Amino acid sequence: MTIIDEAPPMTGAITARGVERSFGSVHAVESATLSVPHGKVTALIGPNGSGKTTLMLMLSGLLRPDAGEITVAGADPRTDAAAVRAAIGWMPDQLGSWDNLTCLQTLTLMGEAYRIPRTAARARGAALLDRVHLSEFANRPARVLSRGQKQRLSLARALVHDPQVLLLDEPANGLDPRSRVDLRLLVRELAAEGRAVLVSSHVLAELDAMVDDAIFMSKGRTLGADAAAMVADARLKYRIDAIDPAALHAALTEGGVDFEPTETGAITRIADEANAAQALGWLVRHGVQVHRFGPVGSALEQTYMAMNEERR
Ligand SMILES: Nc1ncnc2c1ncn2[C@@H]1O[C@H](COP(=O)(O)OP(=O)(O)OP(=O)(O)O)[C@@H](O)[C@H]1O
């Protein structure tokens, strides 16, 4: 995974440079600069109120920026809204569904709104319901769907016109574990088909397995090289737990290794898997009874926690 850490060239499926938007005195987005490529899944990560939804609304052409440049599939949402709408599939964090329409009617109507002939729109709707595992609800009104099922209908709706760019705002919200795995696989498939996918979520462990790139937002700003360095550092951290933590600390000190002691062992930085294998062998040869040894966990989660940020 790479982190976008510098002003991108204005290529890519979505690009934004110096984008700003305020609501009265609230600077929801102060400065956003990013590039989202085709064929990849890019995460948009930030605390509550950091400006993710506002940014996504601007990228999708639903909200006008006060300043800055945006292109989506080569078009500017301010001057060529129709081209942007045709290129983009938007999954909002809450589906505003037409409760009395069936799932299939919802997708058919949506397809017709994109000028797909009714028969083709219906066939496409049925195929999409199958893809999000909602076929059995095709002829049931959307109001009977559970929250997670509504999320899946929302994703199908975003795909109706076969968009090349997908903006997914908290798509895993309300999904059960099985549906989260399905979502992850589906999102990877959509990227493998060449689409650009920008996905915001608070479930970072899940994003780790889903995304190729990450963009961090804090207080209305996209973070650059600082966040990239933090993710790179987080990836190096290993947790070592031993039956006798004091013996582990003594061995690490003797070996001249920098570490943070923990109650059950230590956290240290290891450059790569070959070094990890060497370090483990060395500890065992020194008689340390190691019972757990591995990367600390989700690099995105750790970076997020390390971000010097206040919720707002
Ligand atoms: N229509 C609006 N009017 C006034 N303030 C708004 C409006 N929309 C957003 N804001 C403010 O802008 C800031 C950014 O909000 P935004 O919804 O973009 O954040 P977010 O990162 O998506 O948050 P969350 O993770 O909670 O969904 C917040 O302080 C919010 O209160």
Image (tube, helix red, strand yellow):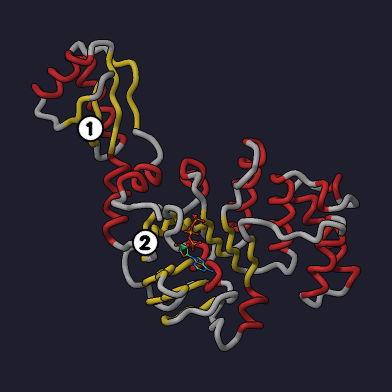
Q: Which residue is mark 2?
A: 219
Q: Is residue 75 visible?
A: no
- Residue 106 seen by the camera: yes
Locate the C terminus and report the quarter of the image it occupies. Answer: bottom left
**Residue 235 appears at what percent x and percent y?**
32, 42
Label 2 CB-ligand 1 distance < 8 A: no
Q: How many labels sit on residues? A: 2
Lateral position of residue 72 relative to residue 283, left or right: right
Q: Position of residue 298 (x, y in %)?
A: 40, 40
| Residue highlighted by disc 1 | 268
Front-lying residue, 66 or 83: 66
Q: Helix, strand, or loop for circle 1? A: strand
Q: Considering only order in the chain, which callout, 2 or 1, is on the residue closer to the N terminus?
A: 2
The outermost residue toward the bottom is 79
Quick one: label 2, few (<14), some, or many (20+) residues within 10 Å? many
* Label 2 secondary element: loop
| Quadrant of the rendered image containing residue 159 | bottom right
Image location of residue 233, percent across then percent down: 27, 45
Task: Kindly identify the amino acid type of the residue bearing the numbered disc 2.
Answer: Lys
